[in-house]
Amino acid sequence: MKSILLTLSILFMTQAASAQDWAKEKLAKSPRHQEWVTVKHDGRSVDTFVVYPESKDKRPVVIVIHEIFGMTDWVQDLADQVAEAGYIAVAPDLLSGMGPNGGRSSSFEQGKATEAVSKLNPDQVTADLNAVADYGKRLPSANGTLFVGGFCWGGGQTFRFATNRPDLAGAFVFYGPPPDKDAMARIKAPVYGFFAGNDARIGAMLPDAIANMKAAGKTFDPVTYEGAGHGFMRAGEAPDAKEADKKARAEAWQRWKTLLAKS
């Protein structure tokens, strides 16, 4: 019974994530410059969505790491919102070259990207993120400051990337699991957490993450948004959003922008 319920839950989440016409329409109306670029490294090509802020000054770069659903319309819209806030958003499709006929997230049938993301090689993910981060820092419009933020699976990868990238100015983990305790010793940047009150799986990991980061002498500042469910940054924007998710999304978004501005 538990396995059936889990399967149904994943199916529902996948369908909800894929039905994002509202995000696609919003993105299409954006006045900001958006482009797909190809970042190459070690024989791989990583298709990466880049959005530039409307600014005359050089700006920090924010690496945006997608959910387990891959590079969806919502992730691209979120990247545009990051640019609207004044940052260069660089969002790699980590399924680049892994899809049917060597495609990326958009080449998968509905629901299939989730399985592919869950099977990605961690070393490949780190190498992709490092290459994309290096690309972002080299942009003529970048000022050399680098942040990373990710959601769900991408939240866990954000936390893990902080253990592998010493020049980060900050890592923003949205309802993602922590890395291994021993790896936390390598973290240089402050890590900020955004968690849902109604998220038993990730919530159960939080006490140990707090204790382990403290023991390692690292900065970890998590906030839990009571009443919100896992994925509230996306779900809170949907036309049928629950009030608790909408509230959590609004508060988390404001907190994220405030932290970016202070870092």
Image (tube, grey):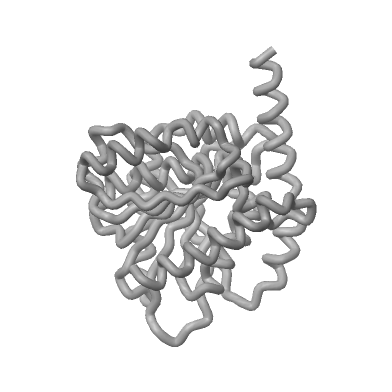
Where's residue 101, x and y in %?
Answer: 60, 37
Residue farthest toward the top in the current orientation of the protein: 1
- Say left or right for 135 vs 153: left
Residue at 71% over, 66% down: 26
**Residue 106 seen in render:** yes
Identify which residue, 60 or 188, lies in the foreground. Answer: 188
Residue at 28% over, 42% down: 213
Total marks drawn?
Answer: 0
- Say left or right for 94 vs 30: left
Is 181 drawn above or below residue 28 in the view shown?
above
The N terminus - image quarter: top right
- Say left or right for 233 vs 175: right
Identify which residue, 206 or 253, lies in the foreground. Answer: 206
Identify which residue, 97 or 135, lies in the foreground. Answer: 135
Is 150 drawn above or below residue 136 in the view shown?
above
Residue farthest toward the right in the current orientation of the protein: 240
The C terminus - image quarter: bottom left
Location of residue 104 (image quadrant): top right
Where's residue 91, x and y in %?
Answer: 50, 56
Where's residue 73, x and y in %?
Answer: 66, 54
Location of residue 80 (image quadrant): bottom right
